[in-house]
Each structure stands twice: as structure tokens, then as C-alpha cells.
Image (cartoon, rainbow, N blue to C red):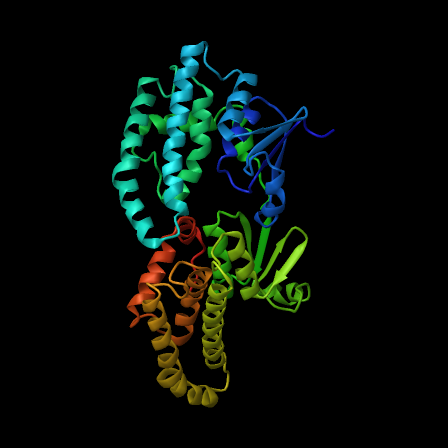
Amino acid sequence: MAPAYKLTYFPVKGLGEAIRFLLSYGNIEFEDFRLESANWAKIKPTMPFGQVPVLEFSGITAYQSIAICRYVAKQVKLTGANDLEDLEIDAIVDTINDMRTKISAYYHETDEIIKEILRKVLFDETIPYYMERIEAITKKNKGHLAAGKLTWADFYFVGVLDTLNVICGKNLIADCPSLQVMQQNVLSLPGVKEWVAKPMVPAYKLTYCPVKALAEPIRLLMSYGNIEFEDFRFDMDDWPQIKATTPFGQVPVLEFKGTTAYQSIAICRYLAKQVKLTGANDIEDLEIDAVVDTVMDLRTKIVEYFYEEDAAVKERRRKPLFEETLPFYMKRMEAAAKKNKSHLAAGKLTWADVHFVGIVDYLSFMIGRDLLADCPSLQVMQKTVLKLPGIKEWVVKRPVTDY
């Protein structure tokens, strides 16, 4: 029998997790439908106001995450004991949502200059202002956000916290001991504890060798988009068996929704569309494609040298590669990055930047030196990409490999 409730949201925690916590706490069975970003354009017109999450039950399609949380809280007895306590709960929840809105505005800003302005205000003023007061309220309420007891306000904050941490690139409650206690309490509650421990099968599975190389741009793009994925790194001894199962005997391959996607650039381009890192028009996409293909041309020339087994032939290839090819390409790519304000195309962050930064360790390894040593604009681009929310966390946790 199908669950009585169906929650529709993206395959992330975001605004859906607090609802999941509340339903789990109340032992309310629900279908956790996580839509693929690629299908959002089709699903969006079916939503009441073109937004998610929505919760469907008894012929009702409920929308607005806070309204849904408040309703579910009434069903699981996590509201206030009277109107005044409900007022207190509503006030702190709306305050948390105010902070979330300011953080979200920074995260989704595409103009680099404006984003940097927003960043300084957000991190130097806004976040400290809110967190100092929210921590004080929690301390006053004995480890809770309102009414001196466990309410749905606690669930809302803990549910949205991980997403805010990812966007900000740091733990917002690192200096908030009362909020830390509250988080631990909520995550230890019956139902919630089991939900958190419940294994969620990632919608995406990436298969590649146990290195960065051609797969790392894909990993960076999915991390940037907060897309959960299984990072399957096979043992090289198993490659003969795995090779026979791939479309053209090559990796990486990305499996999702019955699709087995191949060719690293094609996969990157697809993911870039899902995480909004493509161009604003066909001309910008042309510019992005051109520079990505140029980077791959350079990779091909380096690979021909690196994997050459005949020592004499390899030596003959070395001189033109290091004295002609590399200077030719890198001079022009550095000039392109300088022209585009430390980006490779369209004067802004695009998947071309993420692709290059993902593959550059591999290229540097093959030539035995830092490819960007004399390229200051490309160095700035590399630092920018590696500090992006999602990517920054991935770099910290990814397996350590030479390339």
C-alpha cells in the first residue's frame, strides 16, 4: 500500500529535510520523491507556485516549507502549548528563514563583483549578528529555540543547517555550544535517528579509475551542485571485466535513471546544465565549448608524450612539447583568463573553469611540473573554483591521489 504522504523535493536536504525529520519523528510513513534536476522544467508547471517542496496527502497539495512544517508539527505534537508559545516558535523560525534568505542570495549571485560585496557583509556582519542572538535564545531556552522545550523550531533549524553550512563553507554553530547540544538532541530522537542512519542510494554512480584525471571535473561539478553520487573507483586488476560492460570500453561513465552516459566532456556539459554553469546564450556556450576542446587538445598532446613507451620516441617528443606546444597553449589560455576576469569564458564562472581546474593536476603530473606556475590569472581561477561551496568540501574529503 502506497504511503499516505508524498514529499516532492530535489535530491538534497535543503528545505525538505526538516519536513522529513518531522514525519520521521511522528512515525508517519511517506514517499520521499527526489526529483532529478533535469526533469524540473517539466515538473515545475505542476507545482502550485512553481516551487518545491510540496507535500501531497488526502487529495491536498501543500506548499511552502514552513507552512508544511507547522502542519506536520501539529500532527506530531511539537507545537506550543498556547498561542503565545506558538508566536515564539513562529518568530524564531521566520528569523532563521530570514538568515537563510540572505545566505541564499549570496550563494545564487552570478555577478562576481556583487557576490564579493555580499560575501563580506554576510560573513563579517550578517551571520555573526544572527548566530550570536540565536545562540543566546537557545541558551535561555535550555537547549531549545522556543518555549523552553522541544518544538518544531528545533527541527526546522537542524534540518536546514547542513545546507547552510555547505553554502557558507563552514560550520555555523562551531562557536555555539547551546545550538550544538540542540542539534545532537534532535538527531538522537527516535525516528529522526533512524532516518539519519537510513542509507540513501545516490541517484548517480560515477565509475572511473582510482585517480582524478578525466573524472575529477565531473566530481567537482556534482559536488558544486550538491548532487549526491557514488564515486566508484575500481581496482585496476578488475578493468578487463569492467571494460567489457562500458559503452565503448572507456571510462568515465555516469549512470543515472537507466542512462549510462559516456565521454567525459559530454557528461560535464550535461551536469553543467543541471547546476547552472552553462552560458547565458548560444554564443557564450560556443565560447565555453571552444576553450574546453582546446584544453582537451592540449591534454591529448601531453598524453602522447607521457604514455609513449619507446624511450627514443619519447625524447623526440619532449623537446617540441616543452619548448613549443606548452608555451603556445598556456600563453593564450592565460591571456584568455586575464581577459575574462580570471575565468576561461564569458567573463564569469562556467563549467569551463571547473573542467580545467579538475584536470590540471593530471596535466601537471604528466609533465612533471606545475602547469600554472607562470599563469597568475589561471592561478586565481584555480583558487576561486577550489573555494566554491560544495567543491571545497569535496576536496577535503576526496581520496588522496597523485593525479
Taking 275 as reference, is 379 above or below it?
below
Residue 179, position as x, y percentages in the image: 36, 27
Q: Residue at x 43, y 24 (%)?
A: 154
Residue 403 can be seen, yes or no: no
In the rendered image, the vertical position of residue 259 relative to residue 12, given as above or below: below
The residue located at (45%, 28%) in the rendering is 156
Residue 26 shows in this picture:
yes
Residue 222 in percent (x, y) is at 50, 53
Image-quadrant location for residue 237? bottom right
- Foreground of the two, 222 or 55: 55
Quadrant in which the C terminus is drawn: bottom left
- Furthest toward the left, the residue is 124
* Residue 255 at x, y percent in the picture: 62, 55
Q: Is residue 204 above or below residue 316?
A: above
Q: How many marks?
A: 0
Relative to residue 65, is residue 102 drawn left or right? Answer: left
- Left or right of 283, for residue 42: right
Which residue is nearer to you in this view: 131 or 44? 44
- Report which quarter residue 120 is drawn in: top left
x, y percent for residue 88: 39, 17
Residue 239 lies in what quarter of the image?
bottom right
Nearest the viewer among 166 and 90 is 90
- Residue furthest top in the image: 82
Task: Report the side of 134 relative to 204 (left or right).
Answer: left
Q: Is residue 27 above or below residue 339?
A: above
Quadrant of the drawing holding the N terminus: top right
Please tell me which residue is depicted at 49% across the width and 58% down the height of the picture: 278
